[in-house]
Image: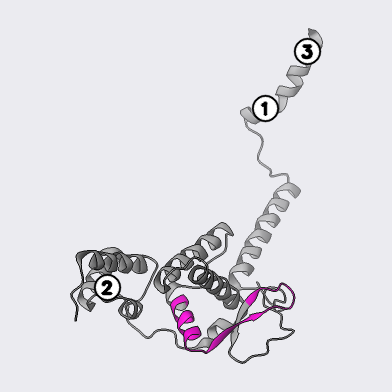
Amino acid sequence: MLKKSLTEDAQEVFRAIALIELGARMQVLESELTLSRDRMIRLYREVKGVSPPKGMLPFSADWYMTWLANIHASLFYNTYVFLKKEADCSHLDALTKGYRLYLEHCRNSDVEAVLDLTRAWTLVRFFDAGMLQLTKCCRCTGKFIAHKHDLQENVVCGACQPPSRAGKTKKAAAARQASLETALLELSLVSTNEVPEPTVLEHAAMLQPRTESLIAQAA
């Protein structure tokens, strides 16, 4: 086995840190990097402050077929493919950069990220194994994730044709209920004349235009 140079070893450490910061599990680190398990565990504890979690990785491709997960996974994988083919990035660089771009898009759109790094990494593995494919939507012409050998013609993606209960989650229902309760409270205050009286500063702000008008007329 060839001994790695200090530069190559440092690059491996930086890659490990980047993956850990994005939420990679130990199985991902062991598959993508050549560092020893002990070093990766020490790095994980140093970066995260806790020991790496245990447990199995996601193993079913069906998770990516649900409506919301399919949209998020398709967004990430199209970004990954673009970085790998057009920007000539390596697999690991395309994975980390593509996932960062996905998180940035979610933040800018004020949307909760559905896909974690482990799911993103597993998605790439499913494509490499020939279990999934990109299918072109007949409406928006965008490419979305589908099972291998599924129909390729006249297929509509989940973004163009969402299910009837799309967006009707418990979180959205709780937000609507809170908004309704606030509106009812304001309505009850108005109907019972319990609206708080304006403060002195608010009175002054309301009287200022009238005062300026009288001064102008007197002049």
**Between disc 2 and disc 1, whose residue precedes?**
2
Marking on residue 7: none
| Disc nearest the viewer among 1 and 3 | 3
Percent of width and height locating residue 119: 46, 78
**Residue of label 2:** 51
The amino acid at mark 1 is: Ala
| Disc nearest the viewer among 2 and 1 | 2
How many residues crowd mark 1 within 10 Å: few (<14), some (14–19), many (20+)?
few
**Residue of label 3:** 216
What residue do we see at 33% from left, 67% from top?
15
Q: Quadrant of residue 7?
A: bottom left
Q: Secondary structure at mark 2?
A: loop
The amino acid at mark 3 is: Ala
**Residue of label 1:** 205
User: 104 left or right of 1?
Assistant: right
Magenta-span inclusion, residue 135? yes
Percent of width and height locating residue 65: 59, 83
Q: Which residues are magenta?
A: 120-143
Q: Quadrant of residue 18?
A: bottom left
Magenta-span inclusion, residue 18? no
Can residue 36 be seen here? The reply is yes
What residue do we see at 59% from left, 88% from top?
147
Q: Are marks 1 and 3 in contact (CB under 8 Å)?
A: no
Q: Quadrant of residue 111?
A: bottom right
The amino acid at mark 2 is: Ser
Q: Are marks 2 and 3 in contact (CB under 8 Å)?
A: no
How many residues crowd mark 3 within 10 Å: few (<14), some (14–19), many (20+)?
few
Percent of width and height locating residue 189: 70, 49
